[in-house]
Amino acid sequence: MKRVKKAGALLLSAALVLGLCGCTPKQEQQAAFDAFMHRQFVETVQSDYLTAHILLENPQDYGVDMTQIDVRIGTPLSETDAAEQRADLADVEAEFARFRRSELTAEQQDTYDIFAFLLQTSMMASNTKFDGYPNYFETMTGIHTQLPTLFADLTLRDEQDVKDCIQLVQSVQPYIQSLLDYTQKQADNGTLMVNLDEVIAHCQEIVEAGMDSAVLHSLQTNIDGVEMDAAQREIYKQQMEQAFADSFLPAYQAIIGTMDSLREKPNNTQGLAHLPEGKAYYELLVRQNTGTTDSIRHIRTQLEQLANEQLVQIQRIIRAHPEAYTAWAAGETRTGYTDYAEMLTDLEQFTKQNFPDVGTFDYAIEPIDKEIATGGIAAYFNIPALDGTTPQQIRVNTTSTEVDVQSLSTFSTVAHEGFPGHMYQMRYAYQHIQEPYRNGLASFSGYTEGYATYVEFLALDYLTDVDESVRQLETRMGIFEHCLTALMDIGIHYDGWSKADLRTFFIQNGLNTDVVDVLYDQLQANPGAFLPYYVGHMQFMRLRTEAETALGEQFDEKAFHAAILASGSAPFEVVERHVQAYIRQTKADKALLCRQQPAA
């Protein structure tokens, strides 16, 4: 967030207009809060080109001036003044503190609580004791893994976008170099925690592909999709090739060189708990990644309880239906789907049964480029612009031999990304939440990924042609494994587990120890990465259980889903408030109905 000016002429003029209109102090407070949130949205969007480009097709309609934005992939860290950022946050905090939450509308109170959570978390993260702790080269979500997908999926709407995209590619090398300089300082200061071999291996694939890269191919294809003079298009494609050769590939070569040079430097190959402020930093990551203020001890207890509940149910199913377990364990069960389009079409229809209606809308199913479609990723969803007019996009993996289109896990993944997961969830938010800041910038992965994980298991119930016991095993085993994975993450990064400790945990829980080393390395290099999915899912399960217990036969699944969707991406304290409101309203409606019925 940029520094907020405290007394601009615009604000003074707005105050005079409000006074002349005879607004009450409460109305003035609400109008001032809307103005504050609008300014936060505009200043944040104008601080980053990619945010503006991805979120808005018509930025001028939101008061965003694209001419004020530097066209580059990110702000090089060497240009970032941490002290100034802390001062900016302090200014925003001081201005925000002037608003009286009780005088805001119900929707504004949601926005207030969402912004308060984000602001407080940002203030905590800006503490100098955490300088040097963020890792920009995590093996799952590091910048080196994100850039290929980002460029492959970047929408080019007109000729200016093509020019901007070329400039973005040109900016990759200096931005990456600033991150490498920062990583070098981490090594010098004793806070380096990077899986060097994994990062190098990933970057070598990019470098070896060279000018035959699928990333460059996607960029050129995107240029071909823009209406313009054919001769000019070829000029732009040549410029893109040059930018790719001069900046993108050298950036990946620089990553390889720097990572290789760090082999002799101190590098923490265990969890965050082994760094001086590591446990405190992990507590911050848990807060950021789960959207809760629950203590790690409380989260761990919840995970252990949920895991035990699943295990009991798994054992009951196996005793009653051993043949179902045999089929499930062998991976023999097939959904019958042979393509993603048919799967999404059916999921869209299924969603209408148990979720609020969002109408019909266009979406496109596009294959993931072969070079990017590594591993077992079946699909992912691209966030649409707030004012988007183009079809929403699902990317699917049609090339990897690791993905079986007919498997239960592929069906769950498509439900997670499409219906009733992210694509549906985003559509609902855009229809029902008017605040652009909340739809575009309020990022709570515990909510978004937790919700999508929650519905991916619900979607299995739609597969009525699949044996119910097998579906139950897929669900129960999935939740059980999720709980254990989250517990492992906590063990490694908060309790300081070694690989030997993790092996002991595996043995205690009857798991195959052959994957201990691989899983340890993955969790160690990506602290908290799985928590949004698994802890977030657990929170939604908890809220559903509370609603079902409180309402009994009055529980309505569609109404419950409307309640958890009402807040949009938010901390769970806000989501829970909507669920409690649903419970109270349902009880009140029942009580009213009982009073209206004549006595027998």
Image (cartoon, rainbow, N blue to C red):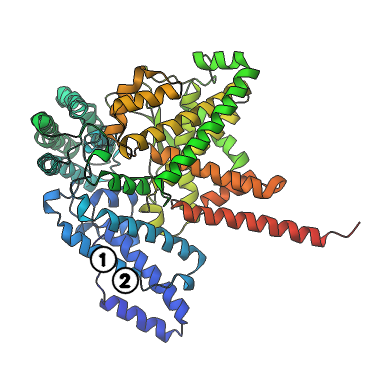
Compare marks 2 and 1 and give the one earlier in the sequence.
1
Q: Residue at x 26, y 36 (%)?
A: 146
Amino acid type, callout 2: Glu
Per the image, the residue denoted by label 1 is: 90
- Looking at the rendering, which quadrant does residue 200 occupy? top left
Towards the viewer: 198 or 495 = 495
Q: Quick check: 463 left or right of 398?
A: right
**Disc 1, SS:** helix
Assess disc 2: are there few (<14), some (14-19) or many (≥20) residues with their C-alpha within 10 Å of its C-alpha.
Answer: some
Which residue in the protein does label 2 denote? 95
Q: Give me the disc on residue 594.
A: none
Q: Is residue 375 left or right of residue 266?
A: right
> With 388 as the anchor, is 263 left or right in this view?
left
Name the foreground residue: 463 vs 534: 534
Determine crowd level at label 1: few under 14, some 14-19, many 20+ residues with C-alpha closer than 10 A: some
Q: What amino acid is found at the position of numbered circle 1 in the picture?
A: Ala
In the image, 209 versus 56, the foreground residue is: 209
